[in-house]
Image (cartoon, rainbow, N blue to C red):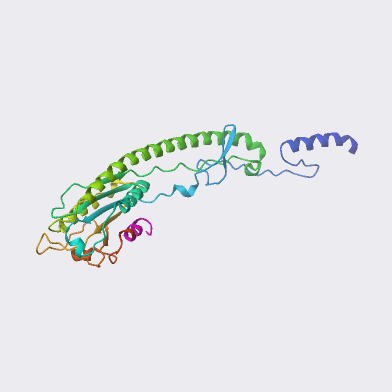
Amino acid sequence: MTELLKPKTAKIMAFGASLGIAACLTGCQLKPRQAQAVPANPAPVVGEVETGKSTTVATKQPSEIAIKPPEVFFIANDKTGSVKSSKIPNLTIDPVISLAQSVAKNGGEVRMGNVCTDSDLPLASFYASEPPSLPNPPPQKPTLQTAGNPLNLPKLNVEYRQQLALYQQREAAYNREVAERERANKQKMGTFISQVKELLKQPANCGATDIIGMMNRADLYLNEPDSNWKQKPRKVAILITDGLETVKANPKPIEWTSKAEVVLVSSGGEAGILKPLLTNTPFDSINAAVRYVIVDR
C-alpha cells in the first residue's frame, strides 16, 4: 500500500513546490495566513519600481515630502549720507540673491527698497509660488512573503499594476509642474536681479533718512493675509541702517502691526527708533544676518 502511494505523494509534492509551499502528508494541516492586500495609500518604502520591461530604483523618498513654509522677506537698504560715518555695511548683490534663491526653493516673496529722503519709491520684487507636493511613495510590488497566501498573488499583482499606473501619472504631473515652476522662477529671477542692481547703483547721498516711511511700507507688505499661502509663511524684515530717523523731528514709535521678525544690520550696534522692534542684537555683517534668516532658522 505504501508503495502505491509513492507516485501520488511525489505528484503532490511537485504541485506544492510549484506553488512555493510545502505539501502536507497524512496528519498535517496547512494553515494559510490571511492575504495582506496592498493598501490604497501604501506605507513609505525604499525599493524598486517596476516600469514595463525594466526595473528602476525609486529616486523620491518619503522624507522629501516635507516642505518648508514659504518665506516673505523685506530688505531695506540705507542710502543716506550717514551710512559712511555710521559704518553701515555696504550691501552687494550676492546676499540678495541668496535670499531670493531661498524664496524660489520654498515659495514666497522678497521685496527690496532703498531708504532715502522719500522711501515711497519703486521696489525690486521677486515672487515664487509654493512648490508642488510630491505624490505618495510608489506601491510595493507583492511577493510570496508579503502576500502570505500565494494563491492571492494574481489578484494582488493586478491591484499593484493599477496602483503603479496611477502613481506614474501623478509623478509625471508633478514633474511637469516642477519644470514649469523652475522656468517661471528663472525668468522672474533675471528681472529681479536687474532691478536690484539698479537700486544698488544709487549712491549713498540722500539728505535725510525716512526710516518711518520705509517701515510703514514694509509693515503694510508683511501684514498681507497668510491665507494667500498653503502654509503660514515666515515673515522677516532685513534692515541695513543705523535706524536714525531724520525726516521727522520728533518721530512717534513705529506701529508694527505685522509682528514680523526684524533683523537689523548695523556695524556700530546703533538701532535708533528700530530698537523696540528687535528680538536680537544687531548684526555686524550682512552675510551673518542672511545666514541667520535662511540657514540657521
Q: How many marks?
A: 0
Q: Is residue 112 magenta?
A: no
Residue 223 on image: x %, y %: 23, 52
> Which quarter of the figure is the N terminus placed in?
top right
Residue 283 on image: x %, y %: 29, 64
Viewed as shown, does residue 184 lie left or right of 166?
Answer: left
Q: Nearer the viewer, residue 261 or 102?
A: 102
* Residue 214 in which image quadrant: bottom left
Range covered by the magenta-colored residues = 288-297
Viewed as shown, does residue 226 lie left or right of 7?
Answer: left
Q: Residue furthest top?
A: 53
Asked whether residue 1 is in view, the answer is no
Residue 169 on image: x %, y %: 47, 34
Dominant secondary structure, magenta: helix
- Give the residue at x 45% y 36%: 170
> Which quarter of the figure is the C terminus placed in?
bottom left
Depicted 108 relative to depicted 162: above or below: below
Q: Residue furthest left?
A: 249
Residue 220 on image: x %, y %: 20, 52
Q: Nearer the viewer, residue 295 or 18?
A: 295
Q: Nearer the viewer, residue 11 or 183?
A: 183
Q: Is residue 289 magenta?
A: yes
Viewed as shown, does residue 290 lie left or right of 152?
Answer: left
Viewed as shown, does residue 237 lie left or right of 102?
Answer: left
Asked whether residue 125 is in view, the answer is yes
* Residue 10 in which image quadrant: top right
* Residue 128 in which image quadrant: top left
